């Protein structure tokens, strides 16, 4: 937007105060944005690339300011236009190239971080599936062991109940036999 404003200012007879105010506002926003980005830079390469952006911005702004001075203070629009074409435009291109290099580095960094996060997610998923499989296996083994123990206990209980019934039957027969013997003895005594 500032480049467009600069071109508009060069081709106007008298500079618009609104355009000048907007240009100043944009310049401050850009400076604030660079300061915010600088706080977030944590790698040496990031800091170097941002320093290059700042350096190319300073060069661009100095040449652009010279063109503004020619236009606004010296009222020399022809020389200001010539300076814009010969020096400001290449400086602006270099400034944009520095931003593009910084942005490409950031994109590559984000891409690497995304790939690493994807790898960690895949590893986590693999570990999770392995743990779930182990848990299912252990649950199955526990179920088999428990079922076997229950079956063994049930079998033992059934066997013990059968033996107990057999003993009860034998005992009842002995009691019946003794009762018969007592009855027979009592009859003989009578």
Image (cartoon, grey):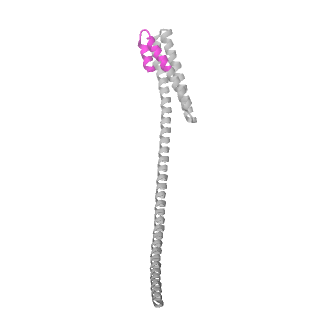
Where is residue 140 drawn, in percent x and y? 46, 62
Along the line of sight, the residue nearer the viewer: 5 or 117: 117
Q: Is residue 146 magenta?
A: no
Q: Nearer the viewer, residue 176 or 26?
A: 176
Say which residue appears at 48% left-offset and 67% top-offset: 149
Q: Residue furthest bottom?
A: 188
Q: For the N terminus, which image quadrant?
A: top left
> x and y percent of residue 53 in the render?
53, 28
Which of the two residues, 106 or 13, is positioned nearer the viewer here? 106
Residue most toward the right? Answer: 44
| Residue lying furthest front | 190
Q: How many marks?
A: 0
The location of residue 12, given as percent across then percent down, is: 41, 11
Q: Is residue 114 above or below residue 81?
A: below
Residue 179 lies, in percent from the top left, at 46, 83
Q: Residue at x 50, y 9 (%)?
A: 73
Q: Is residue 91 above or below residue 103?
A: above
Give the residue drawn at x 49%, y 60%.
Answer: 138
Q: Is residue 16 magenta?
A: yes
Look at the picture and state if 152 lies above or below 188: above
Q: Which residues are magenta?
A: 1-27
Q: In the image, is residue 109 above or below residue 38? A: below
User: Magenta span: helix, strand or loop, mainly?
Assistant: helix
Foreground residue among 29 and 12: 29
């Amino acid at each position: 937007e500032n480049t467009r404003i600069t071109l508009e200012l060069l081709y106007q007879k008298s500079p618009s105060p609104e355009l000048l105010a907007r240009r100043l506002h944009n310049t401050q926003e850009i400076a604030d944005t660079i300061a915010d980005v600088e706080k977030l830079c944590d790698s040496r390469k990031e800091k170097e690339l941002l320093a290059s952006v700042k350096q190319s911005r300073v060069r661009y702004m100095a040449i652009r300011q010279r063109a503004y001075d020619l236009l606004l203070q010296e009222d020399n629009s022809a020389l200001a236009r010539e300076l814009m074409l010969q020096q400001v435009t290449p400086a602006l291109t270099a400034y944009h190239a520095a931003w593009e290099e910084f942005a490409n580095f950031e994109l590559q960094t984000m891409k690497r971080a995304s790939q690493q996060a994807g790898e960690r997610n895949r590893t986590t998923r693999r570990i999770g599936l392995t743990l779930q499989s182990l848990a299912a296996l252990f649950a199955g083994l526990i179920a088999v062991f428990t079922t076997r123990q229950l079956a063994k206990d049930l079998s033992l209980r059934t066997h013990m109940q059968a033996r107990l019934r057999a003993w009860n039957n034998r005992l009842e027969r002995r009691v019946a036999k003794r009762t018969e013997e007592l009855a027979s003895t009592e009859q003989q005594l009578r």
